[in-house]
Structure formats: C-alpha cells, structure tokens
Image: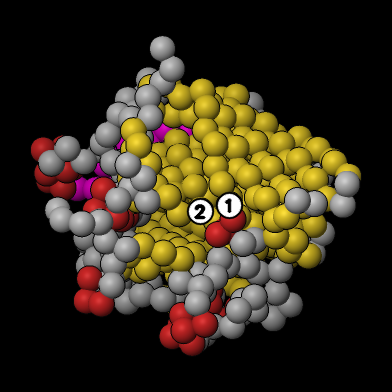
Amino acid sequence: MGLPQNARLADSDADFKRFNVVRNRPHPREDALRTNGDRGSFEWWYTDAAFEDGTTVVVIFFAKNYFDVSGPAWPTVDFEVTNKNGERVNVFVQGEKGHVVSSADGVCDVRIEECFIRWQEDGSYLVRYKDDSIAYDAVMKPKVPMWRPGTGYWLYGEGRREKQFGWFVALPEAQVDASLTMNGTTRTLSGGHGYHDHNWGNVSLEYVFNHWYWGRAKVGEYNVIISDMILHKRYGNKRLMSFMCAKGDEIVSDDSHITKAERSGMHIHPKTKKFLDDSVKIIQRVSDDEEYVISLDRKYDIMYRSLLEVVSPMKRKLAQLAGINPTYLRIGGDVTLTVKKDGNVESHTQEGLWEQYFTGSNKYPTIEGVTYKPME
C-alpha cells in the first residue's frame, strides 16, 4: 500500500478561497445540492427531532440508494419514528432510479416524490415525509447559528488522488413542532428539539474511514456536537476530530486542532462482532483557565443495522467475499458536559444519543499505529 497518504481538515486561508466560503460565516447556500449523482459520489440531508411526549423522528434524504456510493443516482427518503415505549417503525420512499435528486439552485430545497426538506427565508426548515400510510410535517426553527468545521471539507490525499468529504450543520439546535399521521390517526407533536446536517463527497466511506463516533446533545444551557473519526489504513489510521460547543446562540469553542479523545470500557458487541466503547470522553482544553469535557456513557443501544442490507444481493455477496462488513449502531446514554472557566466549574448531565459508524471489518481498533484491545 506504500506510505500513508495525507488527510486533513481544510481550514487554511487558501482552502477558504478555494471553496469560496468565509471563515466563521456559514451561509444557507452551503446546504444546497453539491453532487450530480455520479457513481462514486454521495450526499444526504439528515434531520432528527425528539418531542416532549417521548416520540423521536429521524428523516434522511439521500441522493443515492442509502449509502450505495458506487451505484447510480436514486433519490431515497428514510423515515424512522420511535414511540416512548420503544416501538419503532422504519419505512422509505424512493424516486426514479438514475435520476438526480430534485433541488432548487442555491438553497436547500430537496424534493423526492411527495417528500421534501426546504429552507425558509426566516432561517427555519420545513420537513415533510409522505407515503401511502404515513404523513409527517415539521417546522424546525433555529436556536443556534449554522456551523461547519473549517471550510466544511476534509481532504484525503493530494493532487489527482485527493478525495473529499463535506459536512455542513445547518441546524445545530432547533425548536421543532410537527404533526404525524399514522394508521388514520393524526397526532400533534410539540415541544421538540432537533438537528439537521448535510454530508456529501466523491469517495466511498469505506475507502476513507475505518470507523467513527459522532454525537450531539443539549446539556443545560449548552449544545455540543462531537466526532471522533479514525481513517483507513491507507491514511495511517489517522484520527481526525471535530468539536462544537454553543451556549445559547453563541458558539463558544470549536477549534478541532486542540480536541482530544479518551475511550474506555471496550468490549466486543454481540451484533456487530466488533469493538464498542462504553465510555467516550472528548476534551477541549482551550487554555489553563478554560476547558470543556464531554463524556458519553452508554446505557443501551437504540438501533443496529448492517449497511449491507440496503445494497443489491450481488453487491452484498461481493462485499462479504472481500471481507467488507459495514455496521451502524445508534446508542443512548448519559451525556455529561463539564465546563471549567475563569476559576468556576459547572457540570450538567442529560440523556442523549450518539452513533458508531463502522466501515471496516476489523475486530479491534488501530489508531495512529497503536492497536487497542479490551482489558483482560
């Protein structure tokens, strides 16, 4: 394989000029369609909402057939609702295979059959999912400014070998009100808080990533977003991180270059057959007088999925023969934020969710040359 290729967050002055974005000034146009549906590209718009009655809803708009990066354009909307008793319904709608997802120019206005996600002039988003038996309509109003790490691009390799992965957080925290019709009954969902982000790129995820942890939470007066990404061996299993902490409507810290991670409680998960950490700690030490520590402590699993479920039987078989075993875990537990600033210490704990996305088939993690295994 040769020497590891370079990988980095694009955040130099030259990078901002290249991608035509302004440092620390995200713009709604960055949430518009970025790809043309070609094989080798991917793009999706993700939304979630948790309501005061315990209902949670996740709606994801894909430009492809889910994560089928090598496949043709195939607009797909995935809808998942979970009631407070744990009952879960997961359905989807697809547009015409081979057709690029329908979108307006310059803004987020993505339409797939009767479903859409649409930016409004007041900064809010409208989200609709509709099929023959379910109708969900939500209004998501921003409570925290749009955000992205650096330019929003991570770059893998250089020159002709360069690959790109993009991330734009349009709604780090939103107030959500919605209606949900299922089985002929309509419910009003109120008091919700939600999130919306957007990913795109020109490379399959398994080519770049080995695994990642990603999470977000509202804890006390703060909103936090973190990711701990471990790259493929071809990039030296390098660790790339992101961190955002906002208090009210102000982002107080987001310099990923100073973000550190600690993991503990590693074990082999019974379904993925790969490692999972029961505790993930993200440390953001700004100075001797300012530090933010986020602890994710697992209590239960919300959902497991083999990502081979959403590809054709032929691709599934080829992946298995090649040892490819992509898995996804959505995890629930306690999120604790401890803030040390100006001689004061405050700590807040809130139940939240995070995910482990795992494209590799390895049982144990290798991070920047070191392989970690569970304690005996």
| 99 is within the stretch colored magenta | no
- Identify the magenta region: 302-312
Towards the viewer: 54 or 92 = 54
Q: Earlier in the sequence, mark 2 or mark 1?
A: 2
How crowded pointer 1 is (Cα within 10 Å; few <14, some 14-19, many 20+) is rated as many
Q: Is residue 342 above or below residue 90?
A: below
Q: Amino acid at mark 2?
A: Met
The residue mark sitting in front, 2 or 1, is 1
Q: Which residue is mark 2?
A: 241
Cα distance in 3D space between marks 2 and 1:
7 Å
**Residue shown at the point (88%, 47%) measured from the top left:** 343
Towards the viewer: 373 or 168 = 373
Q: Secondary structure at mark 2?
A: strand
Q: Which residue is mark 1?
A: 259
Q: Are marks 2 and 1 in contact (CB under 8 Å)?
A: yes
**Residue shown at the point (51%, 53%) measured from the top left:** 241
